[in-house]
Image (tube, rainbow, N blue to C red):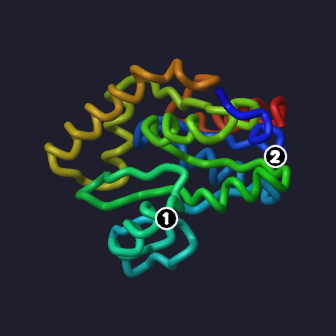
């Protein structure tokens, strides 16, 4: 059970947009950013190599493995995981908890593993979780392949991961359909849920 003193210190709300790779989390968040630039959209930290077109601090903060592991030791991350070729990805504790203390709405894209970790730290009264549910796994594969060709092994791994995430969808507060070609409607529903609970 959460300590009541801890619960009372947060005035804001953390909204977690949950779902497998390809479910539309990033696209929905990009729509929300245009509609609500005053909301907070924390940036992930990662140890993966920066691509030539990427700017540090736009989509990711890039850290060395050594610095990331020091951050883990120091308790700097609200959640972290090793994904995609042994790279670390994580969410800064300070970025989110400071914004919640200030009464802000914070919107974060996350996988189910990250959601389960964050649920242990952020009080339930300050947390809303929304799972984006695709029509089918075939639909999901189609979306992922539109981003570029992937090895068969990687597709299998992502499908297994997607099945695991979908099996846990009911742990989230809400499940919103993410239908191909209807991203605006999906964003509308997500926005409505956030505003109702803000």
On screen, residue 80 above or below 62: above
Task: State the image coordinates of residue 29 (x, y, percent, origin top left).
Answer: 63, 49
Judged from the image, the secondary structure of the residue bearing numbered disc 1 is: loop
Label 1 sits on residue: 74
User: Residue 136, relative to residue 105: is it above or below?
Assistant: above
Of 119 and 150, the residue lying toward us? 119
Residue under the point 70% across and 54% down: 97
**Mark 2 residue crowding within 10 angstroms, few (<14) / some (14–19) / many (20+):** few
Quarter of the rendering occupied by the C terminus:
top right
Crowd around label 1: few <14 · some 14–19 · many ≥20 (10 Å): few
Q: Position of residue 36 (x, y in %)?
A: 79, 53
Give the x, y percent position of residue 67: 41, 74
Q: Is 197 left, or right, of 53 in this rendering?
A: right
Gap in angstroms between the C-alphas marked 2 and 1: 22 Å
User: In the depicted view, which residue is nearer to us: 101 or 28?
Assistant: 101
- Of labels 2 and 1, earlier in sequence is 2
Residue 4, which numbered label? none
Q: Which residue is mark 2?
A: 9
Instruction: Answer with left or right where residue 109 lies relative to residue 189.
Output: left
What residue do we see at 24% from left, 53% from top?
Answer: 149
Q: Residue at x 52, y 18 (%)?
A: 170
Image quarter of residue 4: top right
Q: Is residue 50 visible?
A: no
| Residue 129: quadrant of the picture | top right
């Amino acid at each position: 059970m959460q300590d009541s003193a801890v619960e009372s210190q947060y005035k804001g709300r953390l909204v977690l947009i949950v779902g497998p790779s390809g479910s539309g989390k990033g696209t929905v968040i990009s729509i929300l950013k245009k509609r609500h630039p005053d909301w907070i959209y924390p940036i992930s930290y990662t140890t993966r190599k920066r691509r030539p077109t990427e700017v540090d601090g736009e989509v990711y903060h890039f850290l060395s493995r050594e610095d990331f592991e020091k951050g883990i030791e120091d308790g700097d991350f609200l959640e972290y995981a090793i994904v995609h070729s042994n790279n670390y990805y994580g969410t800064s504790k300070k970025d989110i908890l400071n914004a919640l203390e200030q009464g802000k709405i914070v919107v974060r894209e996350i996988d189910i593993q990250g959601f389960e970790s964050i649920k242990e730290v952020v009080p339930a009264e300050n947390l809303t979780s929304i799972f984006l549910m695709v029509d089918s796994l075939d639909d999901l594969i189609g979306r992922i392949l539109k981003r570029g060709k992937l090895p068969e092994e990687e597709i299998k791994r992502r499908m297994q991961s997607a099945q695991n995430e979908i099996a846990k969808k009911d742990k989230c507060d809400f499940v919103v359909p993410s239908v191909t070609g209807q991203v605006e409607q999906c964003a509308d529903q997500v926005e409505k849920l956030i505003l109702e609970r803000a």
